[in-house]
Image (cartoon, rainbow, N blue to C red):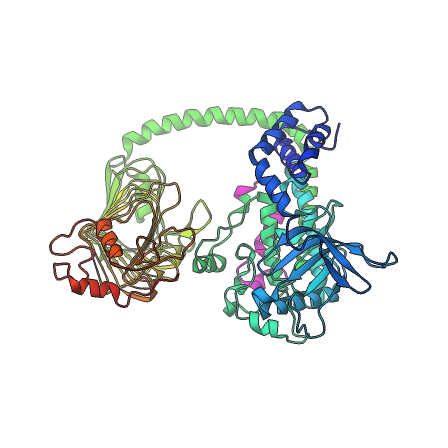
Amino acid sequence: MGPFERKSDGDRDLMIRRLFDEAVELPADRRTTFIHEASAGDQDLETSVHELLSEVESEIDEFQASRFKHPRIGTTIESNGGGWRLLELIGEGGHSLVFRAEWSGPEDRSTERVAAIKIFDTRRTGRKTSSRFRTEIETLRRLDHPGIVRAFETNLDGDGTNLDSPWIAMELVPDPRWISDLTLNTGAGMDSMEASLDLLLEACDAIAQAHARGIVHRDLKPSNLLVGSDGRVRVIDFGIAHLQPDLRRSSMQRTIEGSLLGTPAYMAPEQVDISLGPVSPRTDVYALGVVAFRMITGRAPYEIGENLLAAVQAIRHVPPLDLRRISPSTPESLVRVIERALSKEPSRRQSDASALALEIRTALSEGDAFRSMRERGRSSMLLPVAVGILLFGVLIGLLVRSDRNIEDAVRPVLVSVPDDTPSIQEAIAMVGDGGRIVVHPGTYEECLVIESGSAFTLESTGGAEVTVIRPAVSESSVLRIGNRVDSRTKIRGFTISGGSTGSRSPAGFWVGGGVYLHNNAAHLEDCIFDQNRSTFGGNLYAMNFTGRIERCVFVRGFADAEGGNAMFFRGQAEILDCDFLDGWTSGDGGGVKTMSGCNRFHGCRFLGNRGDRGGGIVHFNVEHEPSQLHIEESLVTRNHAFEGGGIWVRSATNPLILTGTVIRSNHPDGIGGPLGLSVDQPDAEDCWRDFDADGVVDARDIGALLDHFGPAGGFPGYLYDLDGDGSTDSRDLAIMLEGWGSCRF
C-alpha cells in the first residue's frame, strides 16, 4: 500500500483532499503518474482525485505559471561575496513579496544555501513598512528556537535609511501547511484531536520563548503557524510584534499603538479597546485559544461582521460558541482551558503561552485517564445497561401516552396571575390549548419561554403602563418565543424592560435583550419594549419571523453591534403602527436593521435613533437570498448617523419600497444625507447620488431616482417631497443637492 493507504470510510474525504493538495503542487505532466502511484491500486480514490482536479486544473496551471513569471524571477540580490538568486514567488502581502531563493556564491558558505527572501517595497507603502521590517529583524535576532524561523542576513543598515527595497533572508519551511489544515491528521475522534493539539503545543513552546524575552507576536493565526514536511511547527511573521518596555521605543511602536493591527478573527479584545489595557502575552494566548477552537471544531468561535465597527463589537462583546455542543467528545477539562483562553477580560486568561501549554497538557492527561477507566468498565456494564434502557423506554412511553390524554382533558382554559399561580411562566405551562392567561398589574421578575405546543393568549388586565416584566436572571431574553409557535399565540399589553444580554442565537451571538423571536409566527400587540440591551437587536431580535407586531413602542434599545431598537433577520414579518424611538448602536441601524427577508413596515415612526450607518433604518440583502423591504406610509425623521442619516440601503437587485413615506430632518455626519444607497459596482466606491454609475451627478441621476421610487403623489408626500409641503419642486431638489455629501471616486 502507498503513503495514502485508506484507513476507513470516514477518512476517505481527507485522503482525497490530501492527495489533491500534493498533486496541485506538481507540474501538470507529473500529476497523473504521482496520483496513480500514491493511490496504490485504489481506483476509486484515483478517479475521485482526477475529478476534483479537472474542475480547477486550468486555474491551477495559471496560478502555478504566475509563480515563475514575476519580473524579479531569475534576478540576483547581491550579498557579501555572492548573492541570492530568486527562483519562485511563494508569498505576497500588502507590503512585501516572499521568494524561494538559492545561494549563488562561494561553496564554503556556512549559512543555508536555500532560503525564503522577504522583500519590502517601501516606495509603495512608506515608512511604516520599513519600521515593521526593522521590528521583525530586531525580534528574530533576539529569538533562537527551533519552532521560530531563523533570520540569516539582511541588507538593512543601522537606521534603515536610503533603502528602497530592504530584504531579509530567512529559513525556508519545506512544503508548508497551515497548522489548522485538517489533512495533517487523518485519525478520528480524540486521536485526531490530540495530534492537532500536539502541533499547537509546539507552537506554544516557541511563543513561550518570545514571551520570556519580552516579545508579543500580536498576529498569531493559522497562516503564521506553519507545519513543514518534516512535521515541525514554525512561527513566522513578527512584523507587527510588540517589543516590551525594556527595549528601545522605536518610531514604529509610537506609530502603531493607536492603530488596529492584526487579523480581526484572531484579535483579542484589548487590541480593539484600549480601556482593557495594553497588549501583553495574554493577547497571544487569546489568539492561540481561537486557533485551538478552530483545530478542534473546524470553525471559528464566533463570526466577524463585514462592517469594521461590527467586527470590533463582536471581538469585544460576542461570546464564543459552545464548544461542548459543537464537539461533545472534547474532554471537559480541555473545554475549560480553551474557554479561559478566550475570556474577554485579559486578567482571566492564562498568563502566557507557557502557562497555556501546561494547562493543555494537564487536560489531555486527565482525558487519557478518564478514557482508560471508561474502556475498562465498558464491557462488564454493557449488557445490564442496555436491558435497563430498553425497559425504561417502554415504561416511559406508556406513561407519557397516558399522561397526555389526562393532561389534555384537565388543562384550564383560563388562568389568572397571580390568583391561580404566582408566576407567568407557571401559567404558560398549565394553560390549555386555545386558552387565555390574564395578568394583573404589577412587576413580574422572570424570564419567559414559549415553545411549540398549545396556543394561547397572554394579556394584561391593566395595560403595558402598569404591567411590567423584568428579567430574573442575566444572560437571557426577557421573552423568548421559539420554533413553530403559530399565529394563535398572542402577547398583549406588557412592558418588557431591563434585559441586559439577551439569548444566544444558533450562531452563538447574544441577541434580543428584550424579546427573541425564532422561527415562529406569534403576534405581539400593544406592548412597550424599553431599555433592553444585547449585541444584536437591543429591544427585539427576530429570525425567520413570519408573525405580526402591532401598535408597539420600541424605545431606548441599545445594541453593541447592530439593530439598536430591533433587528429582523430574514422572515416575512408585518410591523404595523409601531414606534422606534431613541435607539442606539455603534454599527448599523439605530432604529431597525433588516437583513434579507421580505419584511413590511406600515404606518410606523422612526424618530431620534442613532447609528454608524442608517440612523433610522438599515436594509442589507444577503447575496442570492430573496430580499425586499417595504416601508409604507411611515415617517423617518430626526435620526442621526455618519452615513445615511435616515436610511441606509445595500440592495442592488431589490430596491427599497417607500410608498407614501416621508423622510425629513435626518442628519448625517459624513456622507449619504437623509438616504444612503450603496450600489454594487466592481470598480467604483459607493456614491449615493450617482444612481446611473457614470461617475458624475447630473439630471439623469434625478430622473433615475424618480423612476426608482415611482410617480409623484399627493400629501403627505413621497420620498422626494423632502420639505413635506405636498409637492415636488425646486426646493426639494435644492435639499437633495445641498449638504448630502460628495461622491468618492
Asked if residue 326 is among those painted magenta in the image, a careful observer would answer yes
Q: Is residue 625 left or right of residue 603?
A: right
| Quadrant of the rendering where the C terminus is positioned | bottom left
Residue 700 image offset from top left, x and y in percent: 25, 55
Q: Quadrant of residue 613?
A: bottom left
Q: Nearer the viewer, residue 713 or 527?
A: 713
* Image side of residue 375 versus residue 446, left or right: right
In percent of width and height, residue 274 lies at: 51, 69
Between 170 and 350, the one lying in front of the other is 170
The answer to whether residue 492 is visible is no
Residue found farthest to the right: 108
- Residue 701 x, y percent position in the rendering: 27, 55
**Above or below for 136 versus 146:** below
Q: Is residue 52 above or below residue 651?
A: above
Q: Is residue 228 something that shows in the picture?
A: yes
Residue 176: image x %, image y %? 69, 47
114 or 398, which lies in front? 114
Whether 391 is drawn above or below 522: the answer is: above
Residue shown at 48% from the left, 60% from the top: 316
Range covered by the magenta-colored residues: 325-352
Quadrant of the image occupied by residue 163: bottom right
On the picture, is 338 further left or further right than 153?
A: left
Q: Is residue 208 magenta?
A: no
